[in-house]
Amino acid sequence: TARGCPNQCSFCLWPNIYHNHIVRYRSIKNVIDELKWLKEKYNMKEIFFDDGTLNNDKKRVINLCKAMIKNKINLIWSCSCRVNNIDEEILYWMKKSGCKLICYGGESANPETLKKTNKRITVEQIKKSFALTKKAGIMVHANFMLGFPWESKEQMQKTIDFALSLEPDTVQFSLVFPHPGSKMYEEAL
């Protein structure tokens, strides 16, 4: 439904390389027309909104969900969201319009790492978003990263333990890699 991400996470490649942190939104009508086309032409039953971060604009997401309901889209869908821009209202509309799963980038249980990577989230926001999402009846996929150069083995284990304590439906642990073009790459040099 959109391309780009306004956030400045130091490890992320895509906003730096492709979009310069600018978000280009498609109109709700354009998205609804495509969803109708996918259903009619391909008998689509489930989709993933591959926005960098679907919930950059809460009002837009709610309007999209309402349009999906109004137009009887009836698709199961999933997406990626940030933990610091989620609440009961947006989750209500997401669930009502067919959202099955949200992928969240928690990244680390270490507040210093969250700060150093410019993630601009807190451990408390991670906990709260996971709990609210599960309460809304939406599955949670957790993304965490291991191997930041300043973290000890104990801090990495703390991230693993923290991620598992949140009881996500699925969890992914990715190795940190300073992709050329990211701020982290410049720091690594």
Image (tube, grey):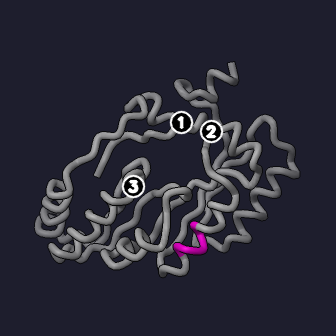
Q: Position of residue 47 (x, y in %)?
A: 32, 64
Q: Nearer the viewer, residue 69 or 78?
A: 69
In screen coordinates, is 122 left or right of 4?
right
Provide the residue span drawn in magenta.
129-133
Q: Position of residue 159 (x, y in %)?
A: 76, 56
Residue 13 to residue 42: above or below: above
In screen coordinates, is 86 left or right of 2?
right
C-alpha gap between disc 2 and disc 1: 6 Å
As drawn, the label of residue 118 is 2
Q: Read off the residue under disc 1.
A: 8
Residue type, mark 1 in image: Gln
Look at the numbered discs 3 and 2 and tell me whether their residues touch, using CB distance below 8 Å.
no
Residue at the spot 24% in from the left edge and 77% down from the top edge: 74
Q: Nearer the viewer, residue 83 or 46?
A: 83
Q: Position of residue 119 (x, y in %)?
A: 61, 44
Secondary structure, mark 3, is helix
**Considering only order in the chain, which callout, 2 or 3, is on the residue closer to the N terminus?**
3
Residue at the spot 19% in from the left edge and 51% down from the top edge: 27
Total numbered circles:
3
**Considering only order in the chain, which callout, 1 or 2, is on the residue closer to the N terminus?**
1
**Considering only order in the chain, which callout, 1 or 3, is on the residue closer to the N terminus?**
1
